[in-house]
Image (cartoon, helix red, strand yellow):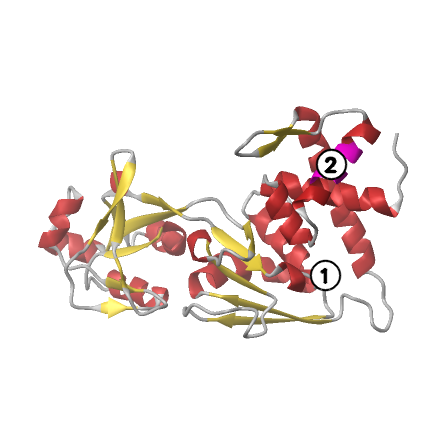
Amino acid sequence: MITGNRTNLADLRLFLTIVRRQSFTSAAIELGITPSAASHAMRRLEEKLGVKLLNRTSRAVMPTDIGLDLAKSLSDGFDAIDQAIHSVDAPGAARFGELRINAFADAAQLVLAPALPEFARRFPDVRLSLAVEERPIDIVAEGYDAGIRYGHHVPEDMVAVPLTGPQRWVVVAAPSYIEEHGVPRSPSELEQHTCIQLLLGDDSNYPWELREGDGEKAWRVPGNITIKDTATTIAAAKSGVGLAYILEARVKQELVEGSLQIVLDEYAAAGEPLHIYYASRRHNHPGLRALTNIIRRHNNLSSI
């Protein structure tokens, strides 16, 4: 049995990070050590415990059954340690200060807003500043602690943690539109309809990506109205302006009340999960990991 000294805690934190990242290199970058040091630390930990914790292949690193059980227990344990540190009420304690997050509007609505009540209750002394904007930004250059975007929009040199599972994109229409124009039965029939164009943060038009066989196909659809804001797109679709391509989670209430209906449901596409990302050298605010875990739990994901 190992003793609880500082080195062992560091090794356990490294092990948990490797399990989450499924990569020695990515975990090493996040924690600011070399991949070689990470590998040596894991061999040392396995020797001290007398069990194999990780299965290493040329393409991935996966925990053994024992390793997975240990990772789950460690996640809870480190959460408890972090909360104990946050509870220190002394001048200069690390929990004080501002946490600055930059997120696009859908992410703010879907993952941040539901997490704010718990975060505010647990961290009353943290000043959380949330900037909601669609444009691509350099979070380090603009002074943010973290950003939230879809996984494929996260810069490669950042540490990225998924906050949700895949996000389903659907085509929706108001009952009034369907009554007047009918329902498209396949993506090719979109050419005969009015489609509300979706404008991205970089001011480019977003193609409608719909499932086709085992993959997806991008469709350029007709329509003279282009909107950059999701809330306005929803309002326009509800008024019968045209078909809209949108995150299913953003129109949950409208689907329940019947003001919008999904069409081409069998062609709905699974998009990238939402990720929170940060530069490892800036991952030093005690509230950031806690906020990440609150959001992940709200989306039925385990803590990190």
Mark 1 residue type:
Pro
Mark 1 vs mark 2, CA separation in Å: 25 Å
Q: What stretch is highlighted in magenta?
A: 39-45
- As for residue 43 lying within the magenta part, the answer is yes
Q: How crowded is mark 1: few (under 14 residues within 10 Å), some or many (20 or more)?
A: some
Picture layout, residue 49 above or below residue 241: above
The residue pinned by badge 1 equals 286
Picture layout, residue 300 above or below residue 198: above
Q: Is mark 1 on a helix, strand or loop?
A: helix
The residue pinned by badge 2 equals 42
Picture layout, residue 63 above or below residue 232: above
- As for residue 272 lying within the magenta part, the answer is no
Mark number for residue 137? none
39 left or right of 88 in image: left
Mark 2 residue type:
Met
Q: In which quarter of the image is the N terminus?
A: top right
Image coords of residue 146 (percent x, y):
58, 64
Q: How crowded is mark 2: few (under 14 residues within 10 Å), some or many (20 or more)?
A: many
Q: Which residue is drawn at 69% across and 42% down?
A: 36
Residue furthest front in the image: 36
Q: Residue at x 83, y 42 (%)?
A: 8
Residue situated in front as seen by the camera: 68 or 80: 68
